[in-house]
Amino acid sequence: MLSLSRKDLVSLVIFGAIVLCMPLWLSPFGAAYPGLMQKFAIYAIFAIGFNILFGLTGYLSFGHAAFLGVGSYTAVWSFKLMTMDIVPAIICAVIMAGLFALVIGYFSLRRSGIYFSILTLAFAQMSYSLAYSVLTPITNGETGLLLARTDPRYIDALFGARQGLSGLPQPTLLGTSVNGYTGFYICAALLIIAFYISQKIFASPFGMALRGIKSNQTRMNYTGFNTRPYTLTAFVISGMFAGLAGALLSVTDPIAGAERMRWTESGNVVLMTILGGAGTLFGPVVGAWLIKYFENIFSAININMLNNFFSFLPDGLQSIVVTIVSKFVGEGWHLTLGLMFVLIVVFLPGGLVEGWQRIMRRIKPRRQAEASDRSLSTQAAE
């Protein structure tokens, strides 16, 4: 059950090495600080879960931010009511997000195609509105759900755990603070586990059934195959991944707000998955890392930085270049992301990972042909 094929095992080892070595290979890109690396890991988990639904079944959900928000709120309530340890918070968040996904999926999956997408978007916007206004006793509305020193934390009180004399309580793992690099490696370990689960789903009969649904669901129904339980299970699993990502957002920053349930968050995970390659194992991770890098690094570039970078140019030319480039960085980083997305959809419709695989498949026969030609030339010379 826990075993992997040799190919998947090699992929898992390589992926694990890449994730754990982030502080080394991200340093030249100016992104090797814990807060950003935590976001890389968290949103990669979010995208992996979304890919299980969209990449395998073809059902495009525009409402996955609802599960992200539910996971986030549940984790903070766990910190407030039970304990500052992150294990119960993560478990409760995953369970609550799964139950919420079960309810939404039960109704949304009665339709397919664009109607399914609109239904999930409607449920997500309803959830956002409820969190923002109606359910303020639970969500604290626009202010967001915050920790307080007066929170009961019954489990901590039962075992005599005490907080410091000043400041707000901080999440811990078995008494160890999860700030900084500790928090990153916790998120990284959960990302590797999420990737492993995704591998098992992709290689399982369940995953093959989901691929069949994506290929031709009508034909499968006509053969007597009941696809509804499979699509609902995929939807729930995907929602649980989103709940895990939401819980980790609250672990790294103990606050939960309605903005995590906005439609823009749902749109971001769709972009991440399509950009990297829907239906591939590595694609959603690559897409998540790329978008979060653009959001946090490109958005921080300003006019002064551009002037320093292009200082080697003549004054007139420098001014022109800086004026043009400034439209694509800083507040205009979405323009760069949009252009890149358009280029990838037009020229690499399967995403970055699938495009890379196609390029490698074309190069491989050429190398084999060249090796064969060299072998024939050697034999002829002899």
Image (spheres, rainbow, N blue to C red):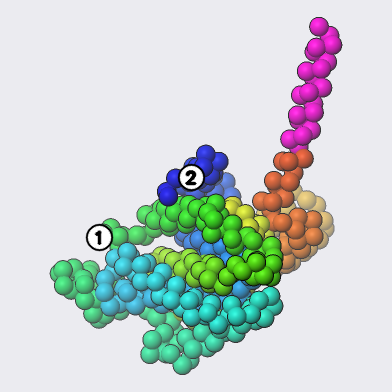
Looking at the image, which residue is at 22% across and 68% down? 164
Q: Is residue 281 visible?
A: yes
Three-letter amino acid code at the position of disc 2: Leu
Three-letter amino acid code at the position of disc 1: Gly
Residue farthest along the front direction in this orientation: 224
x then y, percent, for residue 333 = 67, 65
Looking at the image, which residue is at 46% across and 68% down? 240
Looking at the image, which residue is at 78% across and 18% down? 375
In whole angstroms, how far apart are the C-alphas of marks 1 and 2? Answer: 34 Å
Which is more N-terminal, label 2 or label 1? Answer: 2
x then y, percent, for residue 50 = 56, 65
Residue farthest along the bottom direction in this orientation: 134
Kindly state the secondary structure of the residue where label 1 is placed.
loop
Magenta-drawn segment: 363-382
Nearest-to-viewer mark from 1 and 2: 2
x then y, percent, for residue 300 = 60, 63
Is residue 78 shown above or below 355? Answer: below
Horizontal relation, residue 211 to residue 244: left or right = right
**10 Å neighbourhood of mark 1: few (<14), some, or many (≥20)?**
few
Kindly state the secondary structure of the residue where label 2 is placed.
loop
Which quarter of the picture shows residue 335?
bottom right
Identify the residue under disc 1: 175
Judge whether residue 173 is colored magenta.
Answer: no
Pick the quarter of the image with the C terminus. top right
**For residue 4, which numbered disc appears in the image?**
2
x then y, percent, for residue 125 = 57, 84
Which quarter of the picture shows residue 70?
bottom left
